[in-house]
Amino acid sequence: MGKYNSSKTRVTPLFNKIGSDDSMLNELFKLFKYKVPKFENESVLEICYGKNEKRIPAPKSMLTWMLNNLSELNKLPNYGIKNNESQSYIKRKLLFAGDSKTLKEAIDAVSNVEKSSDSRWYVFEGKTAPDIYIKTKESIFIGEAKRTERNITTKTLWLKNRDQLIRHIDSLLDQEKEIYSFYLLENKTFKNYYEQSMKLYNDRSYFESNLKHRNEQQIDRAFKSFIGFIFWEDLAEKFDIPFPEINE
């Protein structure tokens, strides 16, 4: 991140120019390998990026799966709680010790709370925030932007198999809208940093390993949501944007 922050040096300049303009969004998505529905009649309902990234809660099915499969979570000192005299520490200690009453309390809390705070003792995955979020009447488009990072993000604090883009997709699977997911990448760093990683999204088993709480139909939906990747260099030429090299 730092001075090469892709959100500030790439995403924000791009979407400040494109905004919710149907024709420009159509030009953008024509660059991808797979077709998406045409933007028309001012179809964009919401667009979030940069300082206003959309923060989406983890699905309840994921939070519940984690509670029922604590042995698959990474082992953290003090169960991830800084204060070992706190109520949260006591609850998590009981939870990891296999106390059935505490487990039931945690599962009930996940089920009944409309929006769980990331800091609650029974929550092991926080909100996810795609770099680009575009909602239309029929669809949701979510994108991740990369520049100089040496790889995509494939894990979280608690899970070794939890791909960042798939987390975004997963957070939307309980909605009826069509989902389209993608990457915006730097061409000059693609071969060394991202070429092999992008092949993962052509492998359904990669989605399965990241979506153990989902059924086959939902995994298929997540897998088919990926429309590919395009390069910042092509976007700069297409929209005549002089992207800054560093964040000033």
Image: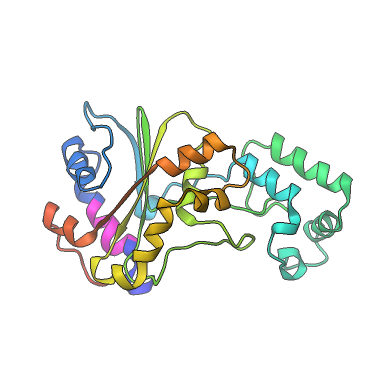
Q: Residue at x 52, y 44 (%)?
A: 170
| Residue 238 on image: x %, y % | 13, 53
Q: Is residue 161 located in the magenta-colored stretch of the structure?
A: no
Q: Quadrant of residue 61?
A: top right
Front one among 10 and 182: 182
- Residue 233 lies in quadrant: bottom left
Q: Point out the stretch of residues depicted in magenta.
A: 7-14
**Colour scheme in the image?**
rainbow
Q: Quadrant of the N terminus?
A: bottom left
Depth order, front residue of 39/198 = 198
Instruction: Please state the horizontal and vertical placement of residue 173, each as a whole percent of the image.
Output: 51, 37
Drawn side of residue 199 relative to residue 87, left or right: left
Of residues 94 and 198, the one nearer the viewer is 198
Per the image, is 11 magenta? Answer: yes
The answer, for residue 235, to whether it is visible in the render is yes
Apparent side of residue 206 relative to residue 15 in the rendered image (left or right): right
Can you say whether 155 is above or below 107 in the image? below
Residue at image position (23%, 60%) is 232
The structure residue drawn at horizontal position 69% and vertical position 50%, both measured from the top left corner, is 66
> Which image quadrant: the C terminus?
bottom left
- Which percent across, then down, holds residue 166? 48, 50
